[in-house]
Image (cartoon, coloured by chain):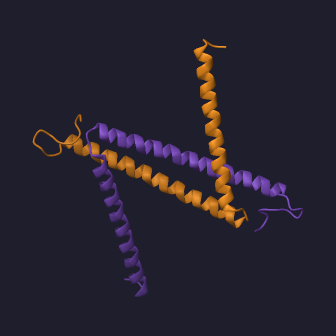
Chain colours: A purple, B orange
Amino acid sequence: MADGAVSEAGGPSTLAQGRLRSLVERIERLEGDKAAIMTDLKEVFAEAKADGFDVKILRKVIRLRKQDTAKRQEEEALLDLYISAIGGL
Amino acid sequence: MADGAVSEAGGPSTLAQGRLRSLVERIERLEGDKAAIMTDLKEVFAEAKADGFDVKILRKVIRLRKQDTAKRQEEEALLDLYISAIGGL
């Protein structure tokens, strides 16, 4: 609620205008980067399909590996917690 | 269907294995980049909120600007098409 929305006069202040413009530009740049990555991803899956791989199974492999990574990270975090709880190894 | 899925013997060929590994790595790298961008986007919206801007309206502004850009691009493409159809200006 700092210098954000509205000035004393009830209209947007120049500061808020500049800040808003900057936020919009940053969001649009990130959205653009995201769109580029989505296009790249589509292309890789299209390549995989052209090579005769089953895209549905490929997606499943990616998902399983992600779950496995998340599980391992969770276990490592828990391990660290337990170790620090007993004052170290 | 090239060297993709299965070798003569019915099992995956070494070539297909290497190719699959490469595809998986590329996808995972892109997914990682995408996740980083999503985090950045979340942070920008959190900043906007902290500054007192209405995130819902901000999202609407972004959407309207995107629609406007798409419309202008469509019009320009149509203009180019008409011009080339009459053999140039």
Question: Looking at the image, which residue sits at the far bottom?
Answer: A86
How many marks the image carries: the answer is: 0
To which quarter of the image does residue A45 belong?
A: top left
Give x and y (percent) for residue A62. Answer: 34, 55
- Quarter of the image with the N terminus of chain B in it: top left
Judged left or right of residue B67, residue B5 is: left
To which quarter of the image does residue B9 belong?
A: top left
Judged left or right of residue B85, residue A23 is: right
A72 and B74: which one is in front? B74
Question: Residue sitting at 23 percent across and 45 percent down?
Answer: B17
Question: Residue sitting at 69 percent across and 67 percent down?
Answer: B50
Give x and y (percent) for residue A82. Answer: 39, 83
Question: Looking at the image, which residue sits at the far right?
Answer: A9
Question: Residue sitting at 57 percent across and 45 percent down?
Answer: A32
B25 and B42: which one is in front? B42
- Quarter of the image with the C terminus of chain B in it: top right
To which quarter of the image does residue B57 belong?
A: bottom right
Give x and y (percent) for residue A87. Answer: 42, 87
